[in-house]
Every structure is written in structure tokens, then in C-alpha cells.
Amino acid sequence: MNELHTLIMKLVGTYEVAQLAGVTAQAVSNWMARRPDFPKPLAHLASGPVWDGPLMRRWLRNNGLIADMKGGTFGMGEFVKGHEYSLDEIRAVLGGETMSYLPQRGSRIVCGRFTKEMNPEAPERVLVGNPPKVQRKAELLAAQGGVLPIFIKVAPGRWEYQGPMEFVAYITDMAVVGPKAAKAGRAGEVVGMLEFRPAEGTTR
């Protein structure tokens, strides 16, 4: 009985994989369908596929989807909503580039860092500028989906954690985006807008 209990505790389903990577269950399904190196399920149950937990965590870590960095654990549990953090503190946990509104680790966007000067309606709405690199970041996030830790700059070198936010849409219809860009004083330099909403079931 103890061996059976130990085995069950090591198994993970789609929900647990999504939680580990901070993405939606649909994103996990997309990985299964599109990534040939994605671990094969141990079994397909009525509730869905199940995987070996240690093997899945290793795959996520190797692909930059979950990682340990400088003693920190990849995840939003390291941050408390409403508290301020330095850039170094954020990067120690999540990684990613220093100068980017959507820092990236491997092939994954790991958080959002936005300013109210550029995005008056952040964190719910974030304007996407026209430089190709900025657009590519938005497109990568749109393909990735899921939940991100979001920070707003409150002072030089200080970022306030807004909590986990779920990506909703990348809007490129200028009939919608144009007025938002004009209101922000960025008319002519914006090509799209990212929409977020507070992640359901989060308390931090």
C-alpha cells in the first residue's frame, strides 16, 4: 500500500503540469501535440493523461519552463502582491533580460515589467510598440498564453508586484488600439495591445 501511495504521489496530470509551468491546460495540450520531445504519458485515464512527475519536472526545467536560479524557485509564490522588489530580486527568481518589458528565459516569457508612463492602463492593458523585437515578444506571449507575474515600476529600480495575471489577448485591430495609443501620447508608434486579467483563484 505504501508503494502504491508513493507512486500516486509522483504522478502529475495536465493541471499539475500547467501549474508547474504557469501556463494554461490548453498550452500543455499544445505542447503534447506540437513538441515531439514532450514526455509520453504513462497512461490515459478518464480524467486525462498522467505523467511521471520527476521526468516531467526535468523536461520543464531543461526547456526553461521551470527552473532553479540562484537558490530561487521559478514561480510566483516568491512574490507578495503589493510589495516592491528590485530588478535583481526579480531576476534572481525568474531570470530573463534586464531591459525588456517581457523578459524571456529560453523560449518562454517569464514575467511582465511595465511602466505607467508608457502604459497608463497597465497591468490590464499594455501597448505594444513598433520595434520588431518588441513585436516578437508580444507574439511569443500570445503563442505561450498562461499566467505571468506582473510588475509595475514605481521608482527607479523599484517594481511593485501586481500579482499573477492571466494573458487574455493580443489585439492588433487599430480601431481598438489607436485610441488607447493616442490617449497615452503614443500615436503612430503602437502596433497592438496586450490584455491581462487577474488570475482566478489567486490570493497573493
Image (cartoon, grey):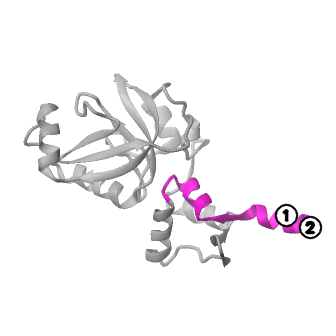
- In percent of width and height, residue 98 lies at 36, 39
When the figure is inspected, residue 192 is found, relative to residue 8, above or below; the finding is above
Residue at horizontal 65 percent and vertical 70 percent from the top: 51
Secondary structure of residue under mark 2: loop
Residue at horizontal 38 percent and vertical 25 percent from the top: 157
When the figure is inspected, residue 3 is found, relative to residue 21, above or below; the finding is below
Residue at horizontal 46 percent and vertical 76 percent from the top: 33
The residue wearing badge 1 is 5
Residue type at numbered disc 1: His
Pointers 1 and 2 in contact (C-beta within 8 Å):
yes
- Residue lying at the far right in this picture: please name it: 1
Please state if 184 lies on the left or on the right of 167 as rendered. left
Residue stretch rendered in magenta on the structure: 1-24
Q: Residue 80 carries which label?
A: none
Q: Quadrant of residue 48?
A: bottom right
Please state if 204 lies on the left or on the right of 105 as rendered. right
- In percent of width and height, residue 20 lies at 58, 54
